[in-house]
Amino acid sequence: MKAGIVVFPGTNRERDMAQAFRVVSGKTPQMLWHQQDNVDGFDLIVLPGGFSFGDYLRSGAMAAHSPIMKAVRRFAEKGGYVLGVCNGFQILTEAQMLPGALLRNAGMRFLSQDCHLKVEGRDSIFTSGWTHGDVFRAPMAHGDGNYTAAPEVLDRLEGEGRVAFRYCTAEGHMKDSDEHVNMNGSARSIAGVLSENRRVCGLMPHPENLTEEILSGTDGLPLFTGIMEALG
Amino acid sequence: MTAAHVDIELARSFGLKDDEYETVLTIMGRTPSLTELGIFSVMWSEHCSYKSSRLHLKTLPTKAPWVIHGPGENAGVIDIGEGLAAVFKMESHNHPSFIEPYQGAATGVGGILRDVFTMGARPIANLNALRFGDPSHKDTKRVVDGVVRGIGGYGNCMGVPTVGGEVNFHHSYNCNPLVNAMTVGLARQDRIFLSAAAGVGNPVVYVGSKTGRDGIHGATMSSAEFDSESSSKRPTVQVGDPFTEKLLLEACLELMATDAVISIQDMGAAGLTSSAVEMASKGGVGIDLDLDHVPQREANMQAYEMMLSESQERMLMVLRPDRTEEARRIFEKWELDFAIVGRLTDSGRITVRHNGKVEADIPLGPLADEAPIYDRPTMEYERQPALVPPADPCGIEKGLLRLLASANGASRAWIWNQYDSGVGGQTVQRPGGADAAIVRVEGTDRGLAMTTDCTPRYGQADPYVGGAQAVLEVWRNLTATGAKPLAMTDNLNFASPENPRIMTQFVEAVRGIGDAGRALDFPVVSGNVSLYNETRGDDGSVTAIQPAPVIGGVGVLEDVRKAVGLAMPQDGELLLVGETWGELGQSMWLKEILGREEGAPPAVDFAAERRNGDFVREQIQGGAVLACHDVSDGGLIVALAEMAMAGNVGCVLDVAPAALPEHIYWFAEDQARYVLATRQADAVMKAAQEAGVPVRRLGRAGGDVLELGDVMAVPVQHLRRQHASFFPRFMGKEEDAPVVHLDEIS
């Protein structure tokens, strides 16, 4: 598998992401500068977390218009795999490569703590490292993670099995209106979604930060092992 | 601005004393220009010149075989093995943080980050020591909210994890909060960059943000007390832009990987003035600046404004002339300004030109050498007499619950949950998981442990003990993770040095820090002094802060996997290392339960501290210890409750030994103590006896209740709810606080 990690000005979790891939594959993905205009030859493009362009406009809005995003869109249209985490998820929605939008957290404060996620997506390399219904822990670190979309869009996502992950309790219960479970107030507790062809995935929390026992646990590893098994 | 008339009145309004202005006249041999007066006033401000503190700071221990650069550089540098260095410093941003809490705190973080990456280090962790006013004071909530958002806003965007720190509340900080920010960075030992300029004719290059009119005279403001007019000083507070700083960080590190940089200095307090003067003075060269080339954010800026602006996110560098274009390309890639604003000369002077006119021309030697230095008067300090131990009015259980729910004893999770503590992907112990934060050194098995500590109420009662105890607690907190403490940075926050009582606090605290540092081989490698932390009321009365000689420490773990946290394990015996004499003076219990801040603080014993700490570290390194927590605020029972809450596991404790009343035993704040959880209690006890270390059995870990004979039995869940209740309630949430999942954090 050849993976590339896009670096925008203000991206700051590219090293974390590279380390997670290194843990499962022994190989370090290539860093791609935002002004690059093609991403040919890659199997997977990752948009990591951070504050692209300071997120001074809307989170991800400026990055969505970077030269490289035209290339990433073409890549995805040809069936390429794209993963966006945190700011990467925000960029994918701003680029309209995934439906919905990420609003300011319901409590209007930055949230940096562990949450639990339930694996719901089907037929995707981004969820295949888990069994459907599994619950895992992941750190969240964002100010704008409140997922929203029109009700019919949400219905469709659910109907097509395109809700990849949802916030839940450690026991796997969803509580949409409980700020200690669905901390950022996301619609229907949605933490991650898939594109129609299930090859583009965005999620807010950071599985890449839980990939080694010494770094508070390995709950995030299946994301990467699933990708590795699928793409070799 | 029309050209102001320079005279002694203007000099006074710039913060210069009359005799200091006389010295300026002598050095210049004429009346200085406005720009020159501005340069003298900021360079000779307390903030830049350390004129009241320098004599005393010289007495601190600063050397050890592992110290690469001690005080005098942008940050301290120590050897952490494998050719790597830790670069760290702590710095205050107190005055701005009261006037404009968000920006004051944010730019405090930005400033200390620059100090560290100026030296070629990638910042890998931030910590913050915060002191706020009484929660009931009208400003406290506003200041807490702004400071926390500001720290998070800057650090989170930079992608530097905020991993630790401390928070106190006390009415002496009502109008003068303390915001002390510490950054730890990582560099290769052969890639450390210093500020001394070299090479006559070499270009002086300005990079980063454009210069605006913000922060003019910020350094002078931080050297003055507060009064009711302070809010009118809002324009002197700088505005931070963490995105630009992130670009500046990446651009500087990219440039530093080449050999283009001869020297580099960030523009912090006193901006272009202080960076240019320091680089040239340290290098023994002159410097010519042409302000026409300075990137400007606003039109028609005067030389005076440009030289004194404290606009953020700027750096000054001396580059090799043949590499200038390569450097320019790197900064253009990161979309940052890059301008050659001057040259080094052999004149020994700083010459500033603007619009073809010389606006300042000052000999650098006298500007540095004849800077004022004061040996300010001190006095006999009335130390508090030993406390006559009071009776217990409420029992252990109630006392414990009240301490845990108090502003000073409550969980800080509400704060740290707004700071990204995991970015960078190396955080081994997040806030609350261990006595010190632990960050792995990328690409190695090593870890750095780091913490900040200070107990101002001890220092108020006895400044010497206050200084020494802060060092001991830092050293103990590093030790309690298994790390070997290497060095410290100090951030000395005091009121006016012109008051002999305050000056005595300062001198005694420095003496305490020095003695403790020498006793523990724990040198000071960097630091910052913040004076005039006091408020003048409308009636003329002055409120001084409780002195806060805050210490930040760094230790190393050769194998980070051997580190331990503080979470109570499911099973194991609990041991207390260290002697309990029953020190209740200045204790948290005395203040929170009886409302008294009285008595002598707990005694410090350097020999016992070192012996007990070395023993504990050895046991952790030997693998005998499951969890370890030092005993500090609130005493032994609070330490045990904190372990229980962190692990979500209870324990069964034996009652106090007969020699001490129950409440004195459990709430006393005797120093040099640790609680260990172990499955090898007999072996640890035997080793302790052989090492001459006092140790006793406390009880067993396990269950979900904190149980103490027939004295108390509290479910851990209840403790956690109490502990988590203060901040959400204080900061505006009516409902009960969330139970924080500490067990998942550790």
Image (cartoon, rainbow, N blue to C red):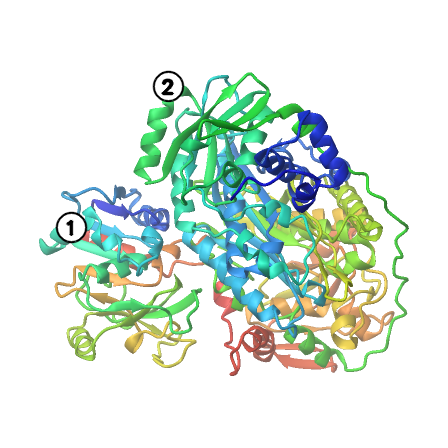
Task: Looking at the picture, tell me which residue is in the foreground, B435 or B229.
Answer: B229
Residue A23 point in image, percent of width and height:
34, 48
Circle 2 residues within 10 Å: few <14, some 14–19, many ≥20:
few
> Quick check: can you spot residue A134?
no
- In the rendered image, which quarter is residue B356 located in? top left
Instruction: Identify residue type, mark 2.
Output: Asp
Say whether residue A196 is visible. yes
In the image, residue B622 lies at what x, y percent? 62, 48
**Residue type of the residue flagged with mark 1:** Lys
**Res. A70 mark:** 1
Left or right of residue B116, residue B383 in this image = right
The chain holding disc 1 is A
Q: Quadrant of residue B76?
A: top right
Q: Which residue is mark 2?
A: B322
Depth check, front residue: B565 or B243: B243
Subunit under mark 2: B
Q: Residue at x 64, y 38 (%)?
A: B6
Viewer-nearest residue: B259 or B210: B210
Image: B244 above or below B321: below
Q: Residues within 10 Å of mark 1 (few under 14, many from 20)?
A: some
The CA span between labels 1 and 2 is 38 Å
Question: Can you give x and y, in whole percent of width and height, for residue B406 in the image?
Answer: 66, 74
Q: Residue at x 59, y 52 (%)?
A: B93
In this view, the residue farthest toward the left is A78
Per the image, label 1 sits on a secondary structure element best described as: helix
Tally the marks.
2
Q: Nearer the viewer, residue A69 or A223?
A: A69
Q: Secondary structure at mark 2?
A: helix
Image quarter for residue A91? bottom left
